[in-house]
Amino acid sequence: MSRDELFIAYMRAFEASTKHLGACTACQNDQPCATGAPVHSEFITRQNAWNERVRAERKQP
């Protein structure tokens, strides 16, 4: 996955997670509902992938 594609996927996952969180009272206080859990998990996965990519790029000369 290219750097741009990875970032776009990360931002889309962030948007989906925040949109769900804002509309779902069951997902408040770090307690995701059954529908929200995979949405939030996808965001965390994409965020971690992005952060790893950024760290790896910093280590290169």
Image (cartoon, rainbow, N blue to C red):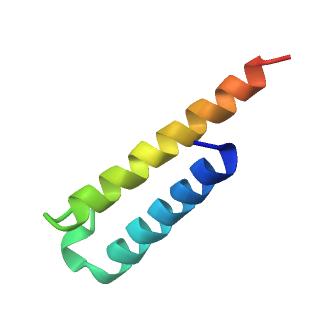
Q: Residue at x 49, y 70 (%)?
A: 15
Q: Residue at x 34, y 72 (%)?
A: 21
Is residue 29 shown to the viewer in this render?
A: yes
Q: Is residue 47 above or below residue 11?
A: above
What is the residue that sits farthest to the right in this orientation? 61
Q: Is residue 2 above or below residue 7?
A: above
In this picture, residue 42 sits left or right of residue 51: left
What is the residue that sits farthest to the left in this orientation? 34
Numbered label tally? 0
> Where in the figure is residue 10, as x and y percent of width and height?
53, 54
> Where in the figure is residue 52, as x and y percent of width and height?
57, 31
Is residue 30 shown to the viewer in this render?
A: no
In this picture, residue 10 sits left or right of residue 59: left
Q: Is residue 15 above or below residue 2?
A: below
Closest to the observer: 26 or 13? 13
The quadrant of the picture occupied by the C terminus is: top right
Q: Residue at x 75, y 18 (%)?
A: 59
Closest to the observer: 47 or 8? 8
> Where in the figure is residue 29, as x and y percent of width and height?
27, 62
> Where in the figure is residue 51, as x and y percent of width and height?
58, 37
In this picture, residue 27 sits left or right of residue 52: left
